[in-house]
Image (tube, rainbow, N blue to C red):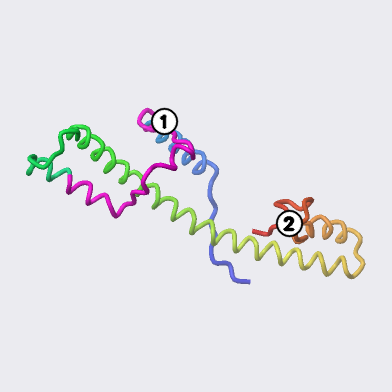
Amino acid sequence: MENRISIVLPPEVSAAFHAKMLEAANLIKPYMVDVTDKGKEPLLKVGDILTPFIKKCLDYTGTDPEYVPKYLDVEEFARDTAALLIMDGMNSAIDKVNAGIDDTRALLANDAYAEATAYYRSVRDAARSGDAKAKVIYEDLSKWFTKGSSKAPGGGKTN
């Protein structure tokens, strides 16, 4: 059986990670806002690709102010853009951490699932051969493979 990853993640590393994440969340909490799903509906979907456009428009307000509409508050535009650029940097850092965690978790989950199913098949075979103890274990574990069963953890899903 191929094992693609083998790590020991010490509890103190996990604890330190969670503490630093909480510290980071608390650090930026005064600057964060919660927007409900309903509140997000009217918002434009402004992705990373438009950030350079926003920055360029802001630059032009300084070099070519004659085109700034009277209703546009350039100082607020500058504050919004500066905060956006900082948030983009934070988001990029978080994305890098998330990507590493997601990749590592995917390998760990696949290795562990392959190992679990090897054990499951062994128990299943023993139960089919009449081993009473194996039958009890097999009946417990087989819940995960019962499609649509509400009794199975996760509703019978094996993801």
Q: In this rendering, which labeled residue sits more in front, label 2 or label 1? A: 2
**Residue under pointer 1:** 26
Circle 1 crowding by C-alpha within 10 Å: few under 14, some 14–19, many from 20? few
Q: Secondary structure at mark 2?
A: helix
Residue 53 painted magenta: yes
Q: Looking at the figure, which quarter contains the C terminus? A: bottom right
Residue sitting at 26 percent across and 43 percent down?
A: 85
Q: Secondary structure at mark 1?
A: helix
Q: Is residue 45 above or below residue 22?
A: below
Looking at the picture, which amino acid does disc 2 mark?
Gly
Residue sitting at 67 percent across and 64 percent down?
A: 115
**Residue 114's x, y, as percent?**
65, 66
**Residue 18's x, y, as percent?**
49, 39
Of residues 113 and 61, the one nearer the viewer is: 61
Residue sitting at 50 percent across and 58 percent down?
A: 104
Circle 2 crowding by C-alpha within 10 Å: few under 14, some 14–19, many from 20? some
Inter-mark Cα distance, 2 to 1: 38 Å
Label drawn at residue 112: none
Q: Earlier in the sequence, mark 2 or mark 1?
A: 1
Q: Looking at the figure, which quarter contains the N terminus? A: bottom right
Q: Is residue 140 left or right of residue 101?
A: right
* Numbered circles on residues, count: 2
Of residues 37 and 7, the one nearer the viewer is: 37
Point out the residue furthest to the front here: 70
**Residue 71's x, y, as percent?**
19, 33
**Residue under pointer 2:** 156
Residue sitting at 92 percent across and 67 percent down?
A: 130
Q: Is residue 73 left or right of residue 125?
A: left
Q: Are marks 2 and 1 in contact (CB under 8 Å)?
A: no
**Residue 49's x, y, as percent?**
29, 55
Q: Magenta stretch: give its range.
A: 28-57
Looking at the picture, which amino acid does disc 1 mark?
Asn
